[in-house]
Image (cartoon, grey):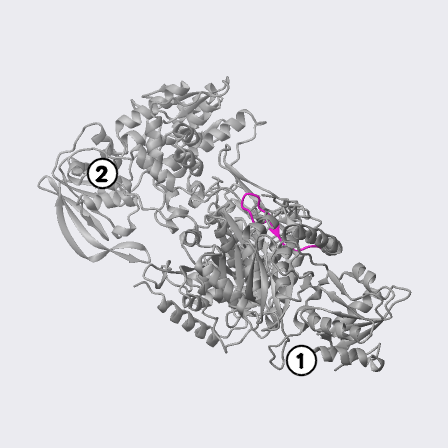
C-alpha cells in the first residue's frame, strides 16, 4: 500500500513556530526579589539552658536517636563526668523546660542520661589531648570535687583528690540512699573516672583550714569543695540521745548502723528528711514526717515526695514540734499547729502530744570549714552554694576548673557556650507521640529492701525517649522547611554530618515560611 | 471540478444528505476524538457521527459537551494530547468559540471544523449567510468554502492532510440547509483509499509525560511578535501546500480542487466572484448571460484564508469589472468579499473596478434571475458604495 | 522522608509565584502526590504567570495553558485523547483559580462533572481575582476587602457553596483541603488519584498580597481557617455523604481567623458574629455520623 507520507512543516519544539516551553524556570533568579533571607543559626535548647552544667541534650539525644550511642555518650561527657549518677539523682531542671511539654509529654531526659551513663560505666573516658606538668589538688570527692577533677584532668592537669572518708563520693556515697543511687553504680562510675585520668586519690584526709593552706603551696592550685558539715540542731533539741541529725543518721545507715527504736518522727520537708524517712521504713521502722508547711510546699523533689506517699509514710503538715520530753525511754513530742504570722511560722494554740522512740531532725546543714577563696585557692560545692543539688555542685566544680585553667594559662580563652537564646519553636507540625510510661519497682519489693525505685530504661526505651526529643535549637534536617518551601529552594542534607539544610539564595524569595515552620527554631529571617 | 458519471475506482456511489456526506468524510479520516454541541443547521452532521460512534463503526471518543466553547476547548485538549479531532458548528456557536479559535491557531494545533454557514441574530434567523465565518477571518484559521456536498466530503479529507502538515486549523464551510439538508449523488471513497491519503496523525509535539512540554506560556512582547510572524509566514505558504495536497489527492481520488476556480473567463468583461453554494446559482446565470452574448465569467473563491491573491490576479488580469458577491457585511465598511478583493488588487496599476454587491443575508433567496438582474443593471451600480438588493 | 513524601520535585525553582504563595506550594505537593504521569491544564489564573514565561516552564510535567472559561472542557479532551491512546494511567489535573472555577469556568466544570469525565479538577481558591489585582469573585467571602469591594462589606451573599453544587453532579470524589494540613492534603490527592470519574478538590490557598498578610503567615492563616470552621476539611465518604476529615480539638472563634488578615479589618463585632454563625451552620452539616 502506498503511504503518502506527510511530514509536519513545524518541527517538534521549534520555538519560533509554536508557543512551546521546554526549558526550566530555574534561570529566573527570583532570589533577587527578597528583602529578608533565612539564616540558619543553631540555638541553645531550653533544657540545656536550665541545666546547671549545660548538658548538650539536644545533641546527644539526636545521636542516640540515630543509633550512635557512643557519640551520644561522648557529647554527654563533654559537660557531665558522672551521668550514671546524675541520671539517677538530678532533680531534672531540664525536663521542666522541655518544649515538648506543650505538645504531649516532655522528654524523659534524666532517664536517657542514666541509660547513657550506665552504658558508659565500662567505657573509659577519652584521654586528654595533651599532658601538662601542672598539679592541682582537689579537696573533697563529692560531686563538685569530682567535676573539678574531671575538667582539670581532661585538660591534661595532674589532679590529686583529698577525701575525708575512707572512700570517695562525699554526699553521693553517704547522703543518698541506695534505692536512689546504688553503691555499685557509684563505685563503677567513680572508678572509671579516676582510673581513666589517673587521678590521685588520698582518702581519710581530714582537712583543716591550715592543711588546705599548706596544699596551696604544694600545688599550682587547690579546688576546695569539702561540703557542709553537721546538720543544724536547734538549741531546744540539743542534748537528747534520741534526737538524731538527718545526715548523720543517713551516714550511719550507710555504714550499717541501724538505730534502735520502733517509732521514728522526722522533722523536715527536704530531700534529707524524705531520704531518712524512706530509709527507716526499709528497716521496718514506723516513721512519720512532721513538716511546718503543707505537703505541697515540701522542697523535696516531686518524685521523692510521690514515692513517700506511695510507700505510706504519713506527713503531719503544718505542724511544729514545740517541746520534747523524755518519757519512759522514749520522747514525748508536743506538736502544735503551725500558723503563719508576720514573724513567720509560729506555733498555734492547739497542741497535741505524741510519743516516738527517735526524733530525726533534717532541717539544714552548717559549714564545718571556713575557707576564703584567694589566689590559687578556689572554693566550690555546697560550701559555696549552701545545700544544693548534685548537679549544681558539679557546676561549681566545672567553674572552678575553668577558673584554675585560666589562671594557669591566662592566654587560653575560656570555652564559651553559645548565649542562651531560647529557640522559638513551632510545634504545629511535630507529630504527637504516645507518652512513655516510666516503670517503677513494685511497692512491696521497694519497701522491703534497697532495690532501686526506678529500674531505668532499656535500650529500646531510651531510644524511644530520645526519638521524642525535638533537639530544639539544632538542625536535624527534619525536612519541614524543605517541605513547606513554595520556591523549591531548600535542599536537605540528611546524610551530612552534622545533618542540615542548604538554602538556594538565588531562588529563595525570602517568604519566611521555613522560619515559621521550623520546630527547632533554627531558622531566622534577617533583613538583606 | 469535472463531474464524472461513474464512480472512480474504490468509490461507491450513494445518494446522501449533505450533512451525512460530511459525516462520512469525517469517518474516513478516523478522528480519535469528536466533541460537539448541537446547533441548527449543523445538527445532522453530529447526529450521524453519534450514530456511527454508538454503533461501533467509528471507534472515536465522542464528547457531548455543554456548549460550543467547550466543544472547541475539548478539541483543543484532545489535539494537544496528540489526537486527531473533529467538531462542527454554526453561527452563534462559532461566535461563542471565537476566543478559542485564536488559541487553536496560535498554538499551532491541527483541527478540522465544519461550519454550516448561518446568520447571527438578532433577530433569530437559521438561514444561510457567511457573516458567522467571515467574522472569524482574523483568527489564524484556514477557511475553505464548499459548493457541493461532494466537495465538502472531499475537503474534509484534504483539510486533515493540510492541517497536520502546516499545523494550523482548518474551517470548512458549507451553506446551512442549502448543502446540509439537501441530497446529492456522491462518490464515497473506500476506507483503504482514505487511509492511503491520510495516515494516522503523528503529533510533532503533544502533552507527553515522557517528554513534558508546556503549551501557551505567557510570552514577552518580542517573543509574541515572533510567534505571530511565524504564523503569518506559514499562512503565506499554504496555497503551495494546498497545491501539493490537491496533487496527492487527485492521484488517488481522480478529482482535483483548486483554491480558485474560474468559469467561462475567456474574454470576460465582467467577472463575478462568489463562494459557497451560491456559486451554483451564479454558474447558471453566467451560462444564460453568455448565451445572451454578455461576456460574463465566474470566479469561485474556495479558499478564503489565506486569501489566494496570486491566483486571483491571474484570473482577473485585464478584466474591467468585478462583481463581488458578499454574504457578509462589515457594517460601516461594506461587504466583506469586496473589501478583500479591493485590498488584494489595489497594488495593480491597471486594476478592475470592484463592485460590492450584498447579494444575500439571512438566507434571502438568490435565483439565477437575481444574478442576471444584477449584471444587467450594472450601469446603476456604485463602484464605491455597497450595492444592496 | 517527611510524611513519606517523594524527594522528586515536579515544580522548578524560579517560578513567578509571590513570596509565601499558597498556590505555588499547593502545586508542588499536588504534583508530588500525583507523580510524573500527570498532565496539568491551567486556565487563566495566577498560575498562568507563575508557570513562567515562554520558553520556560515551572513544571516538569506536561502543561497546557488554556483560556479562562475552558479548563474543564480542555481537560475532557485531554482525557479522551489519552483514552484513545491507551494512557489510562496518566492523570489529568485541572489547576484553576477560584475565578476560573466559581465564575467564568463554571459552565465547563458543570459539563465535565455531569459527563463524569475522569480527571481531577483542582480549584486553588485564593478568594478573589488575585492575578488581576484582587477583584471580587464569587469565592470572595463576605466582608473581605477587594479592589471591587472597597468598603469590604457585602452581606447580600454568603460564599457560594461550590462543594454542594459539584456534589449535585454526583462526582466520584470530592474534598476540601489546604496544604497547611499536609497529611490530609496528601490523603485526599491520593483518593482523587485512585478515583475513577470526575473528582473535585477545593483547596484553600493563602494569597499574602491579596489577603494582606505577611508571607510567613500563609500557612498559619489557612490553619486558622480550618480551626475556626470557616474552611472545614471535608470529603465525600463511601456512603456518599460529606464528612469532616479533621476536627479541631477545640474550635477557635472565627474572629481569630478574621483578625489574622488585614482584608477583614473593617468588620464590626456584629459582622463577625454573623460570620461566626455562618461557620457554625456550615460545620453542623458536615458532622461525622
Whether label 1 touches label 2, CB < 8 Å: no
**In magenta segment, residue A79:** no
x%, y% of residue B274?
A: 73, 70
Residue A239 appears in the figure: no
Q: Secondary structure at mark 1?
A: loop
Which quadrant of the structure image shows residue B385? bottom right
Q: Crowding at label 1, few (<14), some or many (≥20) Cα neighbours within 10 Å? A: few
Q: Which mark is residue C87?
A: none
Q: Nearer the viewer, residue B171 or A303?
A: B171
Q: Which residue is mark 2?
A: A276
Residue A297 vs B55, above or below: the answer is: above
User: Measured along the vertical axis of the image, is residue C123 above or below residue B213?
Assistant: below
Nearest-to-viewer mark from 1 and 2: 1
Q: Position of residue B132 (x, y in %)?
A: 65, 71
Residue B282 relative to residue B384: left or right: left
Measuring 41% from the left and 25% from the top, which residue is drawn there? Answer: A138
- Residue nearest the observer in this picture, B379 or B231: B379
Dot 2: within a 10 Å radius of its alpha carbon, few (fewer than 14), some, or many (20 or more) residues? many
| Magenta span includes B213 | yes
Q: Is residue A259 left or right of residue A195?
A: left
Q: Position of residue B276 (x, y in %)?
A: 68, 68
Tell me which segment is drawn in magenta.
B206-220
Q: How many marks?
A: 2
- Quadrant (top left/top right/bottom left/bottom right) for the C terminus of chain C: bottom left
Q: Which residue is mark 1?
A: B364
Q: Chain of mark 1?
A: B
Please indicate, yes or no, whether residue B6 appears anywhere in the rendered image: yes
Q: What secondary structure do most residues of the magenta stretch adopt?
A: loop
Q: Chain of mark 2?
A: A
Amino acid at each position: 500500500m502506498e503511504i503518502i507520507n506527510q511530514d509536519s512543516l513545524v518541527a517538534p519544539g521549534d520555538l519560533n513556530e509554536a508557543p512551546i516551553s521546554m526549558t526550566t524556570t530555574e534561570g529566573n533568579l527570583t532570589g533577587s526579589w527578597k528583602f529578608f533571607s533565612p539564616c540558619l543559626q543553631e540555638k541553645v535548647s531550653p533544657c540545656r539552658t536550665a541545666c546547671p552544667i549545660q548538658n548538650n541534650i539536644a545533641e546527644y539525644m539526636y545521636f542516640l536517636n540515630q543509633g550512635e550511642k557512643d557519640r551520644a555518650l561522648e557529647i554527654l561527657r563533654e559537660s557531665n563526668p558522672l551521668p550514671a549518677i546524675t541520671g539517677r539523682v538530678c532533680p531534672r531542671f531540664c525536663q521542666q523546660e522541655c518544649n515538648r511539654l506543650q505538645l504531649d509529654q516532655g522528654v524523659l531526659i534524666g532517664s536517657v542520661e542514666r541509660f547513657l551513663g550506665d552504658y558508659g560505666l565500662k567505657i573509659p573516658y577519652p584521654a586528654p589531648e595533651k599532658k601538662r606538668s601542672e598539679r592541682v589538688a582537689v579537696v573533697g570527692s563529692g560531686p563538685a570535687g569530682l567535676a573539678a577533677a574531671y575538667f582539670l584532668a581532661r585538660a591534661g592537669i595532674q589532679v590529686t583528690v583529698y577525701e575525708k572518708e575512707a572512700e570517695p563520693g562525699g554526699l553521693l556515697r553517704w547522703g543518698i540512699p541506695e534505692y536512689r543511687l546504688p553503691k555499685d553504680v557509684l563505685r563503677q562510675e567513680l572508678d572509671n573516672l579516676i582510673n581513666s585520668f589517673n587521678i590521685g586519690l588520698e582518702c581519710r584526709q581530714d582537712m583543716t583550714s591550715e592543711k588546705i593552706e599548706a596544699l596551696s603551696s604544694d600545688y599550682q592550685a587547690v579546688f576546695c569543695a569539702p561540703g557542709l558539715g553537721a546538720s543544724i540542731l536547734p538549741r531546744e533539741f540539743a542534748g537528747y540521745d534520741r534526737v538524731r541529725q538527718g545526715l548523720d543518721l543517713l551516714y550511719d545507715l550507710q555504714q550499717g548502723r541501724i538505730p534502735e527504736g520502733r517509732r521514728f518522727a522526722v522533722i523536715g520537708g527536704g530531700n534529707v528528711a524524705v531520704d531518712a524517712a524512706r530509709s527507716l521504713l526499709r528497716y521496718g521502722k514506723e516513721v512519720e514526717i512532721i513538716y511546718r508547711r503543707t505537703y505541697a510546699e515540701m522542697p523535696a523533689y516531686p518524685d521523692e515526695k510521690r514515692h513517700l506517699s506511695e510507700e505510706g509514710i504519713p506527713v503531719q503538715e503544718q505542724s511544729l514540734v514545740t517541746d520534747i520530753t523524755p518519757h519512759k525511754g522514749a520522747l514525748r513530742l508536743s506538736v502544735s499547729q503551725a500558723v503563719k504570722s508576720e514573724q513567720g511560722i509560729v506555733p498555734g494554740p492547739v497542741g497535741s502530744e505524741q510519743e516516738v522512740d527517735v526524733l530525726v531532725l533534717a532541717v539544714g546543714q552548717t559549714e564545718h570549714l571556713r575557707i576564703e577563696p584567694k589566689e590559687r585557692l578556689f572554693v566550690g560545692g555546697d560550701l559555696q552554694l549552701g545545700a544544693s543539688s548534685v548537679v549544681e555542685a558539679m557546676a561549681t566544680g566545672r567553674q572552678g576548673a575553668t577558673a584554675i585553667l585560666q589562671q594557669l594559662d591566662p592566654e587560653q580563652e575560656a570555652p564559651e557556650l553559645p548565649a542562651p537564646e531560647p529557640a522559638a519553636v513551632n510545634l504545629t507540625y511535630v507529630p504527637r507521640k504516645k507518652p512513655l510510661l516510666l516503670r517503677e519497682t513494685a511497692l512491696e519489693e521497694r519497701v522491703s529492701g534497697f532495690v532501686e525505685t526506678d529500674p531505668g530504661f532499656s535500650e529500646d526505651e531510651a531510644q524511644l525517649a530520645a526519638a521524642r526529643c525535638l533537639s530544639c535549637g539544632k538542625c536535624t534536617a527534619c525536612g519541614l522547611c524543605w517541605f513547606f518551601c513554595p520556591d523549591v529552594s531548600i535542599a536537605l542534607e540528611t546524610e551530612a554530618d552534622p545533618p542540615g539544610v542548604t538554602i538556594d539564595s538565588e531562588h529563595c524569595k525570602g517568604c519566611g515560611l521555613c522560619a515559621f515552620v521550623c520546630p527547632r527554631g533554627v531558622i531566622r529571617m534577617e533583613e538583606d | 471540478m469535472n463531474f464524472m458519471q461513474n464512480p472512480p475506482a474504490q468509490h461507491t456511489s450513494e445518494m446522501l444528505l449533505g450533512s451525512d456526506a460530511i459525516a462520512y468524510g469525517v469517518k474516513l479520516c478516523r478522528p480519535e476524538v469528536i466533541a460537539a454541541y448541537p446547533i441548527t443547521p449543523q445538527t445532522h452532521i453530529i447526529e450521524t457521527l453519534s450514530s456511527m460512534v454508538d454503533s461501533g463503526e467509528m471507534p472515536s471518543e465522542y464528547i457531548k459537551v455543554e456548549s460550543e466553547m467547550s466543544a472547541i476547548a475539548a478539541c483543543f485538549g484532545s489535539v494537544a494530547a496528540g489526537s486527531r479531532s473533529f467538531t462542527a458548528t454554526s453561527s452563534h456557536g462559532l461566535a461563542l468559540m471565537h476566543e478559542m479559535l485564536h488559541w487553536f491557531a496560535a498554538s499551532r494545533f491541527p483541527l478540522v471544523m465544519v461550519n454550516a454557514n448561518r446568520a447571527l441574530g438578532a433577530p433569530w434567523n437559521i438561514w444561510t449567510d457567511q457573516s458567522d465565518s467571515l467574522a472569524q477571518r482574523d483568527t489564524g484559521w484556514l477557511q475553505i468554502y464548499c459548493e457541493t456536498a461532494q466537495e465538502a466530503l472531499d475537503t474534509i479529507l484534504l483539510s486533515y492532510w493540510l492541517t497536520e502538515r502546516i499545523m494550523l486549523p482548518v474551517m470548512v464551510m458549507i451553506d446551512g440547509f442549502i448543502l446540509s439538508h439537501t441530497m446529492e449523488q456522491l462518490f464515497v471513497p473506500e476506507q483503504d483509499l482514505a487511509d492511503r491519503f491520510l495516515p494516522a496523525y503523528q503529533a510533532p509535539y503533544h502533552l507527553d509525560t515522557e517528554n513534558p512540554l508546556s503549551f501557551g506560556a505567557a510570552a514577552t512582547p518580542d517573543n509574541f511578535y515572533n510567534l505571530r510572524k511565524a504564523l503569518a509566514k506559514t499562512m503565506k505558504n499554504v496555497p503551495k501546500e494546498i497545491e501539493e495536497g490537491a496533487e496527492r489527492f487527485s492521484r488517488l481520488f481522480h478529482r482535483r480542487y483548486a483554491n480558485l476556480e474560474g468559469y467561462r473567463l475567456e474574454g470576460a468583461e465582467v467577472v463575478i466572484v462568489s463562494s459557497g453554494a451560491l456559486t451554483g446559482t451564479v454558474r447558471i446565470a453566467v451560462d444564460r448571460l453568455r448565451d445572451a452574448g454578455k461576456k460574463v465569467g465566474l470566479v469561485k473563491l474556495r479558499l478564503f484564508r489565506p486569501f489566494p491573491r496570486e491566483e486571483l490576479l491571474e484570473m482577473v488580469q485585464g478584466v474591467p469589472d468585478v462583481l463581488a458577491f458578499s454574504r457578509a457585511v462589515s457594517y460601516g465598511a461594506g461587504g466583506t468579499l469586496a473589501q478583500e478583493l479591493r485590498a488584494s488588487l489595489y497594488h495593480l496599476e491597471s486594476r478592475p473596478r470592484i463592485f460590492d454587491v450584498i447579494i444575500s443575508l439571512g438566507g434571502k433567496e438568490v435565483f439565477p434571475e437575481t444574478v442576471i438582474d444584477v449584471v444587467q443593471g450594472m450601469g446603476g451600480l456604485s463602484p464605491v458604495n455597497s450595492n444592496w438588493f | 522522608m517527611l510524611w513519606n513524601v517523594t524527594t522528586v520535585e515536579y515544580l522548578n525553582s524560579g517560578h513567578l509565584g509571590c513570596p509565601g504563595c499558597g498556590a505555588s506550594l499547593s502545586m508542588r505537593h499536588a504534583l508530588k502526590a500525583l507523580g510524573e504521569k500527570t498532565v496539568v491544564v491551567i486556565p487563566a489564573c495566577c498560575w498562568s504567570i507563575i508557570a513562567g514565561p515562554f520558553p520556560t516552564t515551572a513544571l516538569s510535567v506536561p502543561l497546557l495553558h488554556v483560556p479562562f472559561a475552558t479548563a474543564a472542557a480542555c481537560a475532557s479532551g485531554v482525557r479522551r485523547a489519552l483514552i484513545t491512546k491507551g494512557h489510562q494511567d496518566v492523570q489529568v489535573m485541572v489547576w484553576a483559580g477560584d475565578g476560573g472555577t466559581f465564575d467564568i469556568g463554571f459552565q465547563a466544570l458543570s459539563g465535565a462533572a455531569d459527563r463524569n469525565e475522569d480527571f481531577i479538577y483542582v480549584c486553588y481558591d485564593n478568594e478573589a481575582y488575585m492575578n488581576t489585582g484582587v477583584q471580587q469573585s464569587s469565592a470572595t467571602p463576605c466582608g473581605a476587602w477587594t479592589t471591587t469591594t472597597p468598603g469590604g462589606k457585602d452581606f447580600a451573599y454568603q460564599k457560594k457553596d461550590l462543594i454542594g453544587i459539584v456534589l449535585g453532579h454526583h462526582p466520584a470524589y470530592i474534598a476540601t483541603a489546604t496544604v497547611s494540613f499536609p497529611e490530609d492534603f496528601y490523603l485526599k490527592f491520593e483518593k482523587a488519584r485512585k478515583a475513577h470519574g470526575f473528582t473535585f478538590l477545593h483547596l484553600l490557598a493563602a494569597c499574602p498580597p491579596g489577603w494582606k498578610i505577611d508571607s510567613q503567615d500563609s500557612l498559619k492563616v489557612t490553619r486558622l481557617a480550618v480551626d475556626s470552621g470557616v474552611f472545614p476539611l471535608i470529603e465525600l465518604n463511601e456512603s456518599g455523604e460529606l464528612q469532616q476529615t479533621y476536627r479541631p480539638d477545640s474550635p477557635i472563634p472565627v474572629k481569630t481567623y478574621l483578625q489574622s488578615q488585614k482584608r477583614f479589618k473593617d468588620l464590626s463585632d456584629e459582622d463577625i458574629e454573623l460570620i461566626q454563625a455562618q461557620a457554625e451552620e456550615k460545620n453542623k452539616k458536615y458532622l461525622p455520623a
